[in-house]
Image (cartoon, coloured by chain):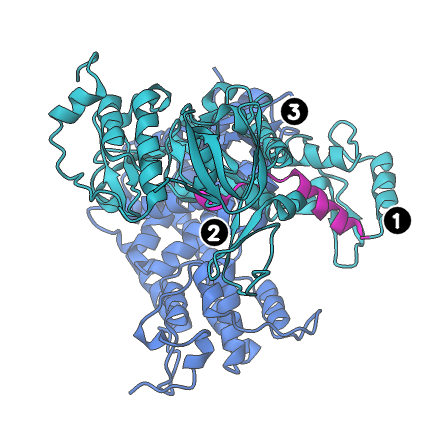
Amino acid sequence: MVRFGNKDLARYPFLREALSYVTKYDFRLEDLDNSEFHHLVKKAERKIEQYVFNGKLEYQIDYNKTHEIIVQEEVIIFLISLLIIKAISIDAVTKKFALMESMRFEKYLIEDLDISNQDDKTIKFILYKIFEDLFKTKIDLEVNIYNFYKIKINDYLDHPIAFHEREWNLVNRTVNSGYVYLDGSEIVRLFRNELNLLIIERIKKMTPERIPYLISAISHSMRVNWEKLYPPLRINPHNAVTPPCIQHIYDQIDKGENLPHPARVLLGTFLIYSNKSIEEMLELFKRLPDYNEQITRYQLEHLAGKRGNPKKYYVPSCEKIKLSNLCFETKICRGINNPIQLVSRKNN
Amino acid sequence: MTTHSSPFDELKNQSNDSINYHSSVHDDINKIWLERVFRKHYFNCNSNIEIDDFVSQREFGFRLFDGHIRRHLNFNNKNELVANIIKHSPSDIFCSSSRYHNPSASIDQKGWIGSDLIFDIDGKDLHLECAQIHNLTYCKKCKLITSKVHLNCIECRSASIQIIEIPCQKCIKHLKLEVRKLIEILCDDFGIDNNSINIYFSGNNGFHIHVKDDKFFKSTSIKRSALTQYLLGKGYLTDNLGFRLNGSDKVTILSNKILYNVGWRARLMKQLHLQLKNHRIDEKFIKKINSIKETSKVGLLNVISSEIENLSVKIDPNVTMDIHRIFRLAGTVNSKSGLIKFHCLDLESFNPFNDACINEDSMVEINSKIEMKLIMKGMSYRIKMGVNCLPEFVAVYVVSKGIGDIYIQK
C-alpha cells in the first residue's frame, strides 16, 4: 500500500488525512489566541494579504522542520486562513482567496503528477485521494501511452471549461475509446473550479464557537482596508440607463465572481464605447479575482484598437449576447438590438 | 398485463379516453385511401413495429390524416399501442427517445429518466448534385410538377415552390457512407459497443441511428451538443495537428507536444498523408507540411478545412440535442413516402426500394401528374402521365409523394 509522504500531505491540507495530524492533538480553533500559535497566525495573515491585496502567489511551505510539524503547521495555517476569511465575511474576498489558494494547490498537483518526478504508484495514489475520493471522478493513468491521464467523456463534460474555452471543447481534445486523454497539467486545470468551490465550501462550513481575539482583530483590519480600496460600485452618476446585461456584470463583479471571457469582452467594449479611459476601466477590472494588470491592460488596449491590429471592436449585438448567455433582458430592452442604444436614455 | 392478448383485446379493455380523435378528413380522396391502406398494413404487419421493454415509460405521438397531432400519449404495452395504431391509422407515429416517470404529462411534469442517443442523417443535408436532377419541383400556386429542382415555377414563375425528394441509389450510397463515418467515430472515439447501435432507414431520404448506451443515457442536452460538435468537426483547431497557422498561412511548429495519434487527429493526419513518429513531430513531418503548403493552390488552412468537411459526419445537431423530441417509431410508415422506417441489420445490402416497401400489392389505379420510372421490389415501373395500374406499395409511394392521385372511376 502506497502512503502519502508527510511532505505530500503538507501540500494538501484540505485532505482528511492531513487534518488528522492536528485533530489527534485535540487542536481547537478557539485556542488560537495562545502565543504558541502566533507565528502561524502571522504566516496566514501574510498569505491572505499577498493573495487578496497584491494578487500574488508567493507563499512557501517551510520544509526545515520535522515532517510531522510541517504537516501540522500547514494544516493549522490553512484553517487559520479560512477562519480569517470567514470573519472578514465579504464575498469578493472569499472568492479571491479561494481562487488564489486553489491555484497554489494546482501548482503542487502539477508538480506531483509530473511523471519525471514521481513513480506511477504515488501518482495513482494522489489521483485516487484527490480526484476519486474528494471530487468523485475516476481518472486513470495510461502508462503505455506516454503517461497520459484519461477521464471518461461523460465525466469530462461535467466540467464547465469543456464548453467555455475553445481549446477545451471536446472536438479539440484527444478522444479515444470513450475517454478524453489529458496530460498532468491539463487534468489539474480541469479541476481548478472544483478546488475553488471546495475551499469556498470549507469556509462556509466553519462554525467556531467564538472567533479568537487575534483573528477578529486581523479580519477587522483587513475588512476596513478592503472597503477603502474597493468601495461599492457606483457606475452611472448621470442617471443614465445601464443596460441589464451590463448591470448583471457589475453585480457579478460586486459579488467577487470571476467573469467568463465573453462577459469581459462585452464589458470592455461597452466601457470603451462609453468613453472610459484605460485607467478607469482597470479600476473596475481589478476587482476580478484573477486580475492581472499587465494582461488586462493589453486586452483592453487591443479591444480599443490601440495595440496590434488597429481594428476597434464594437459592442456585441443583443443576439450575440444572448448566444453567450449574458442577456438579462427587461422591458427597457424592447426594440433594441445592441445595448448601446440604451446609453443615451435617462432614468426617470 | 396479459402476455397472450391480441391488440384488439387491448382496445376493448382500454380506458384511455384521452385519445378521442376526430375522424380523418373526408374531402381528400388520397388521404382517405392512404388511411385505409395504412390501417390494412398495420392490421397485417404489426409485428414489425419495434418497441423496447420500456414502452410504458415512453411518450408517443400520432399525426392523423386530418392533420392533427396528438402528443403525450402513453401505452402500457405493445398490444395497447398496436390496437390504437390500427384504430386510428395515423399518417405518422412517433415515440420519444426519452423515458419518463409520467410520459403523458406535460414536458415539465414528465419526470425525465434519461434518453437514448439519436442521430439523424438527412439526404438534403448532403447537398448532392444528383438531387438537383432527380428531385421534382412542385408549384404551390399553379400546382404544376416539373422534373429537376427550380427556384421558380417554370410555368407561372412563382417562387412559392416545394421540392419533392425522390432519392436515387447514389443518394442512398452517400447516406450509407455518412452512416459508416458516424459508426466509426461512435465506436472508436466514443467507445460505444457496436451492438448498442441500431441503424434505421428513416422511411424517406435518410437514416436514424439509435444508440442505447448507459454511458450517455443520462447525458444532458448540452453534453449531447458537445458530441454533435465533435462529429461535425465544428471549431476544430489546427493546433491539434502540432502546428499553428496564422491568417497568411504562416506555419509555426509546436514541436514539444506529444500528439497521441487517435481520433480526429489520426483521421486528419491520414487524409493529409502526414505521419508522426512515436506520436511526435519530426523533420519528415515538417517537410511534408511545407510541401503541402507550397504545392497547394488554395492554401494549407483551406486544405485542412476541406478535409475536416469531408471527414465530418453530416448529422442534424438539433435532433441529437433535443432530449424531448419524439421520433418516428421503427417499423411504421412514413407518410412522406409510404415507405417504412426500417431496421437495417445489414447496411451494405439494404435497398429502401426493396426492403422498406409495405407488403400490400393489390392492383390499384393512380392518376400520375408526371412521367417517371420507379424500381421497387426488384420490378421496374414506368409511370406515364394519366392513369396507371400499379401495385399498392408503388401507388402508396406515388400518392404519398404527391405526384399522383388515387383514381376511382365514377
The chain painted cyan is: B
Q: Percent from the top left, x then y, of residue A344?
A: 42, 86
Q: Residue furthest front?
A: B410
What residue sits right under mark 2 in the picture?
A100
Look at the image and give the residue range highlighted in magenta.
Answer: B298-320
Q: Residue at x 38, y 88 (%)?
A: A238
Q: Chain of mark 1?
A: B
User: Is disc 2 on the same chain as disc 1?
Assistant: no
Please tell me which residue is depicted at 50% across the width and 19% down the height of the picture.
Answer: B345
Distance in Å between CA atoms under marks 3 and 2: 33 Å
**Marks 3/1: CA–CA distance:** 34 Å
Depth check, front residue: B312 or A289: B312
Question: Is residue B269 visible from the viewing direction of this image?
Answer: yes
Q: Which image quarter holds the N terminus of chain B?
A: top left
Q: Say which mark, if any, is on residue B294.
A: 1
Q: Which residue is mark 3?
A: A145
